[in-house]
Image: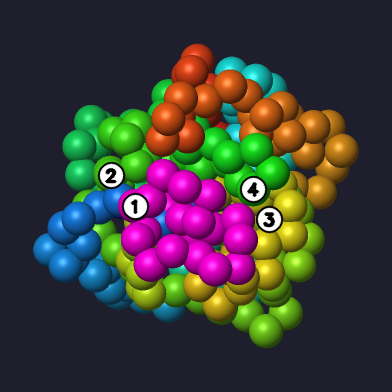
Amino acid sequence: MTACGSSDEDSSDDAGSSTEESTGTGDADDTETPQETEDEPIDAADLATEAVINTSEGSVTVELFPEEAPRTVHNFLGLADGSKAWDGQEGDTPLYEDVIFHRVIDGFMIQGGDPEGTGMGGPGYQFEDEFSDDLAFDRPYLLAMANSGPNTNGSQFFITVEPTPHLTGMHTIFGEVTDADSQAVVDAIAGTETEPGDKPVEDIVIESIDIN
């Protein structure tokens, strides 16, 4: 459903492209995916500010930005702990449990969070972008939402490994990997061997996400 854009400034309009020029999702049916509406306002003060993405390659601690992107952080946390409903959910199973990084481009980003593992899946809803003047893709290790165009956020996310300024204003930034050990895990994932289409040869699994 979503991808994160491109590694060069002449980014492609094809959100499902397998080149470095695309960071969006590949969902061809975005027009049929309903926009989610929140019944109650989200209080950023009530949201966690740290999460740990446990992967088959090691753990990645991310600092979250609820003040700048409250709805996006709320969505991420709900899909991480199973409290937010998503299409295909069994019981209170978290969406971010045993899903893969389905798209990895060395020198650009790692992308995961698709329950189908194809780049075409999502939670069954979309929600609006949240952009902050205080956040830009001016440094590596930023956590952001993948999408297939404006206001098509779902469950897929990516972490950059280089500054990608051309993505500013296109993808919601909602966190950052700040500690060296976690950054090393991200770099290791980014450097993994991939097949055509940027899928790792050996699955790199998001086993769970812990909320701190």
Say which of marks 3 and 1 sits in front: 1
Image-based side of 36 in relation to 15, left or right:
left
Which badge, 1 or 2, is on the more N-terminal residue? 1
Label pair 3/4, CB-CB below 8 angstroms: no
On the rendered image, what quadrant is the C terminus found in? top right
Range covered by the magenta-colored residues: 3-22
Expressed as whole percent of the image width and height from the top left, the position of residue 109 reads 61, 46
Amino acid type, mark 4: Phe
- Which secondary structure, mark 4? loop
Which badge, 3 or 4, is on the more N-terminal residue? 4
What residue would you read off at disc 2? 120
Amino acid type, mark 2: Met
Q: Residue at x 68, y 22 (%)?
A: 58
The label shown at residue 137 is none
Label pair 3/1, CB-CB below 8 angstroms: no
What residue would you read off at disc 4? 108
What residue would you read off at disc 1? 16
Q: CA distance from mark 3 to mark 4?
A: 11 Å
Expressed as whole percent of the image width and height from the top left, the position of residue 74 reads 48, 60
Give the main secondary structure of the magenta stretch: loop
Q: CA distance from mark 2 to mark 3?
A: 22 Å
Q: CA distance from mark 4 to mark 2?
A: 20 Å
What residue would you read off at disc 3? 142
